[in-house]
Image: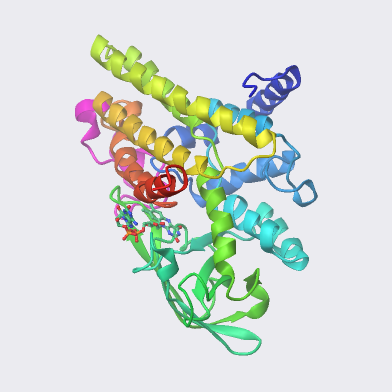
Amino acid sequence: MNLSFTREEEAFREEVRDFLARNLTEDLSAYARRMTSVYATKPIALKWQQILVKQGWAAPSWPVEYGGTSWTPAQRYIFDVEMARAGAPPLSPMGIGMCGPALIGHGSKAQKDHYLPRILSGEDFWCQGYSEPHAGSDLAALTMSAIDQGDHFLCNGSKIWTTHAHEANKMFCLVRTDASGKPQQGITFLLIEMNQPGVRVDPILMLSGEHIQNAVFFTDVRVPKENVIGRINDGWTVAKYLLEFERGGSSYGPRLLARLRAIRITAAEEGALDAAFAAKLSRAEAEILALEAAELQQMSELARGGTPGLKASMMKIRGTELSQHLTELALELAGVYAAPFQPHHTSPGGPVPGFEGLNTAQAGPDSAVTSTAKYLNDRAGSIYAGSNEIQRGILAKGQLGL
Ligand SMILES: Cc1cc2nc3c(=O)[nH]c(=O)nc-3n(C[C@H](O)[C@H](O)[C@H](O)COP(=O)(O)OP(=O)(O)OC[C@H]3O[C@@H](n4cnc5c(N)ncnc54)[C@H](O)[C@@H]3O)c2cc1C
């Protein structure tokens, strides 16, 4: 295992830094500094995506022929580190990070040629329709039906917690095409056009008031058969493939370290870096560095041809736990200024009904205004992408043989 970077990798780091210095505009940085959720709004995410697309860096893990890079795992890690250090906003995860890999891994050439460029251009904005009211952790229990009508399916049912469904024009989803066998059999991976009769999107507001998630209802929605990714009744294979990307596709360490650094600087500026708080920050830093060491180790293994495998579950648990811990430290630092609810002074991940156009003055320092919303939003980190209890179950079974 070699965890140090080569001279070429350090030169690549300089190239990324130079690019960020020239292209990360002040409005994008300012937006990112005040983000309250893990999601940037569609206009911000697409603006930054277009800048990265122009450079050829928007989809590092895609094949070069479709606009990806041929970066090594080390280069991808360095890229993540520098993006986090510079405070760049995140891209929407559903298109480039999830639907793209599903198409690349299981789509036909015609599907790749059609959809991949549209993901990069932003023409298609995707949402993920997996969860249903009675199928979350137990995803194979899903019941949204797709009845074979010859050249198309007729879809009925509902999806829940669907991030960005109100902004997306496309959904990749799992539907039940056969209910006769085991639950994992008879599931099909389907692409659905959102702007058509029979699709209804109702908002679900987060605790912070933001509209990012939705409930989506389908009534007699026609979906052409050419929209199936992979084979009919074999969608579980595509779904499992995709989940590895969702859990193990990005590194937590760089962004966590950048956030910890920001908390420490603010505490010092505000005279709040007493021995007790400094010790809490140091403990958190040690834990993040341990996670980063594990991520670097994994990167080294990937470079030698390994797969994320069980480690993706470990990273997901530690990454989200440490992220939640940082929101607690930020809340402690904010003190009384954590109390006022003032989303109009933050960059929420979606509209906060009732607060549009409000112009009351900001209460408290800049560092405090996002603290409560971030704390509330981050509780979801240990639930989505497979809850942390489920990840522990995977580790217990796969690693400990329990
Ligand atoms: C902010 C947010 C965004 C989301 N975005 C999307 C999206 O875009 N698309 C999408 O399809 N879904 C999305 N989800 C849904 C998410 O994937 C599910 O919430 C998650 O899989 C958990 O399912 P559930 O909510 O039905 O909870 P349940 O599965 O009902 O779980 C309830 C509790 O029981 C625990 N539990 C369940 N089974 C076990 C077990 N076998 N062992 C131990 N503990 C167990 C869980 O850990 C949890 O604590 C999102 C969720 C959130 C919170």
**Lateral position of residue 238 relative to residue 322, left or right:** right
Task: State whether the magenta stretch is mostly helix, strand or loop.
Answer: loop
Magenta span includes 336: yes
Q: Quadrant of residue 196?
A: bottom right
Q: Is residue 242 visible?
A: yes
- Which residues fall within the magenta stretch? 334-361
Q: Residue at x 28, y 39 (%)?
A: 360
Q: Quadrant of ligand 1?
A: bottom left
Residue 98 screen position, x and y as percent: 58, 54
Residue 111 screen position, x and y as percent: 72, 66
Residue sitting nearer the eye, 191 or 283: 283
**Lateral position of residue 178 relative to residue 231, left or right:** left
Residue sitting nearer the eye, 207 or 103: 103
Figure check: 283 above or below 42: above
Magenta span includes 303: no
Figure check: 95 above or below 29: below
Figure check: 402 above or below 139: above
Residue 99 screen position, x and y as percent: 60, 58
Q: Is residue 23 visible?
A: no
